[in-house]
Image: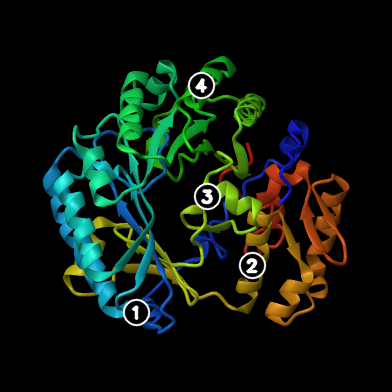
Amino acid sequence: MTQSLAWHPELIQRYDQACPRYTSYPTAMEFRPVENDGIVRQALSASDNHDLSLYLHIPFCRNICYYCGCNKIITKRYDRAEAYVDALIAELHLKADLCGRRRVRQIHFGGGTPTFLTDDDLSRIMAAIHSRFDIIPEDIGIEIDPRTLGSATLRCLKTLGFNRLSLGIQDLNPDVQDAVNRQQPEQDINAVMQEARALGFNSINMDLIYGLPRQTQASFQHTIARVIRWQPERISLFHYAHLPERFKPQRRINTDELPDSATKLALFGEALAALTAAGYQHIGLDHFAKPDDSLAQALVHGQLKRNFQGYTTHADCHLMGLGVSAISQSDQQMSQNHTDLTMWHTAIQEGRLPVAKAVVPDHDDRLRHALIMALLCQGQCDWSELNQHFGVDTRHYFAPEIPQLERMADDDLLQLDDQGLTITPRGRFLVRQIATVFDRYRRLSEIPLFSRAV
């Protein structure tokens, strides 16, 4: 992928339509209800012996953040978490019984707030993982909330083998924090960062969101500048997608206080300039990393991948999701656990895998998946490689898509020829819109179900 960028706000506004983030293809919107757990059992029992990436969803939070679209449970009762950990470990054993003792190269705890759990329960989960799998400590990460971190939790995590931390920052301006109900003083974050560095955590991500209520260019410039001084290895700069019809907490946000499209573009553009000047590499979409980070190195060497955990260097692993709403992915299928906590608990208690929805990709899905992921991760696709791997004449196969691609080529978003398709510097921030051209389940003109470009 070319490393150069071209920032054209007017072009981005013209293509500003809702598109999937393509952490998979087909996307999770195409998952359909299943009558039993047979699809997942069959996939886990397959004898291909792929290495695994584990995702563990911890849904609990002590307080609601109004912008949040995650599957979460707001509670201060820890007994609910204790029962959840018991069921989570039971689900792990159910799946390990089917797939055998595999190598695990990546573990990620997401949420919710994974550090809602006590140090003892985090230790109990990791002990269960070690009892059933062979752990290669390449990438063991966890999302933490600096506001609620236990006094000894970072030391506990280091002892357990965690080597990546992801901090939810979002915005440092107190007025913005009040508007989204996430009050988080800078000194609390600074204290966590100092302790994490002293303990030897050398891979830290910070999540930021632009487009939140009451954000201004001046206030967000302060947030970006402060984050750069903390020097995290990775930065995720997410666009706030206001979808109150899907996410009930967002109904508490005053829409009159949301920045308009022009302001959001300015927020991102200025953040992009500041991060680039500070030496961060744009990985793709809204992800940035230092040049020596593994994601940046994967980009340079054409090895960047993408799955339900976003950009990764471990997409060759099969993804095993554990916990309510967690998604699993293998060569044979993609599936999602029950999003309802009671239904998830009940399935596990009855000895069933708690799968609610799944999709089995067909040949066309696999072809389009390969093409879309090549665009998002390498910024180009080679027709001959697709032809050889899938046994098709790609130019003929995608003839219906060519006219729309040619219009995008006229706008210098891409280059299209007999060899393949290459995203230009002007098109890098519109790669989702380009990918959607190949999405047989939707087109750019459909009703928005996903986040917009800006």
* Spatial separation of the CA atoms under disc 1 and disc 3: 33 Å
Inter-mark Cα distance, 1 to 2:
25 Å
Q: Which residue is mark 2?
A: 370
Q: Nearer the viewer, mark 2 or mark 3?
A: 3
Q: Mark 1 is on which residue type? A: Arg
The numbered mark at residue 41 is: 1
**Which comes sooner in the sequence, label 2 or label 3?**
3
Question: Which amino acid type is shown beneath numbered disc 4?
Answer: Glu
- Label 4 environment density (alpha carbons within 10 Å; few <14, some 14–19, many ≥20): some
- Residue at 31 percent across and 46 percent down: it is 72
Residue receiving disc 3: 294
In the rendering, at what x and y percent does residue 161 appear?
A: 29, 51
Res 217 quadrant in image: top right
**Residue at the image position 72 percent from the left and 82 percent from the top:** 391
Q: Position of residue 32 (x, y in %)?
A: 45, 69
Q: Is residue 308 above or below residue 256?
A: below
